[in-house]
Image (cartoon, rainbow, N blue to C red):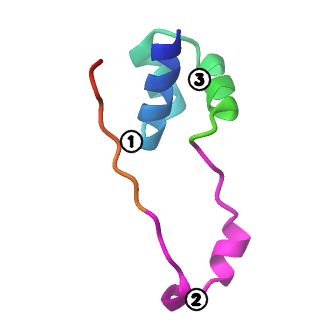
């Protein structure tokens, strides 16, 4: 199960939707949603605050995700 949890997180970071992730991993969409809510690696964006920021004063941190085989 820990591998599936990591795959859910990885797929979300790559822009996959809930239903797509569920279909690929053969789990229910509810399970995907529950795991994403628990995930510490994903953070919600405060869109109101984001709209208030000046682009010249905004620092963006980019992360590269890749699969590492153990």
* Label 1: which secondary element: loop
Q: Position of residue 11 (x, y in %)?
A: 42, 33
Q: Residue at x 63, y 33 (%)?
A: 39
Task: Give the distance between the C-alpha atoms of the residues marked 3 and 2, in whole angstroms.
Answer: 34 Å
Q: Residue at x 58, y 44 (%)?
A: 42
* Label 3: which secondary element: helix
Label placed on residue 66: none
In the image, which residues are magenta?
Answer: 42-61
Q: Position of residue 58 (x, y in %)?
A: 53, 81
Q: Quadrant of residue 23?
A: top left
Q: Is residue 47 magenta?
A: yes
Lower position in the chain sequence, tag 1 or tag 3: 1
Task: Give the distance between the C-alpha atoms of the residues marked 1 and 2, in whole angstroms.
Answer: 27 Å
39 to the left or right of 22 = right
**Mark 3 burial class by Cα count in 10 Å: few <14, some 14-19, many 20+:** many
* Label 2: which secondary element: loop
35 to the left or right of 9 = right
Q: Position of residue 13 (x, y in %)?
A: 45, 42
Q: Which residue is mark 2?
A: 54
Label placed on residue 14: 1
Q: Residue at x 28, y 28 (%)?
A: 68
Label placed on residue 32: 3
| In front: label 3 or label 2 | 2
């Amino acid at each position: 199960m820990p591998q599936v949890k990591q795959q859910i997180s990885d797929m979300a970071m790559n822009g996959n939707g809930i239903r797509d992730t569920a279909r690929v991993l053969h789990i229910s969409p509810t399970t995907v949603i529950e795991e994403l809510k628990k995930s510490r690696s994903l953070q919600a964006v405060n869109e109101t605050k984001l709209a208030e920021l000046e682009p010249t004063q905004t620092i963006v941190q980019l992360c590269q995700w890749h699969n590492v085989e153990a």
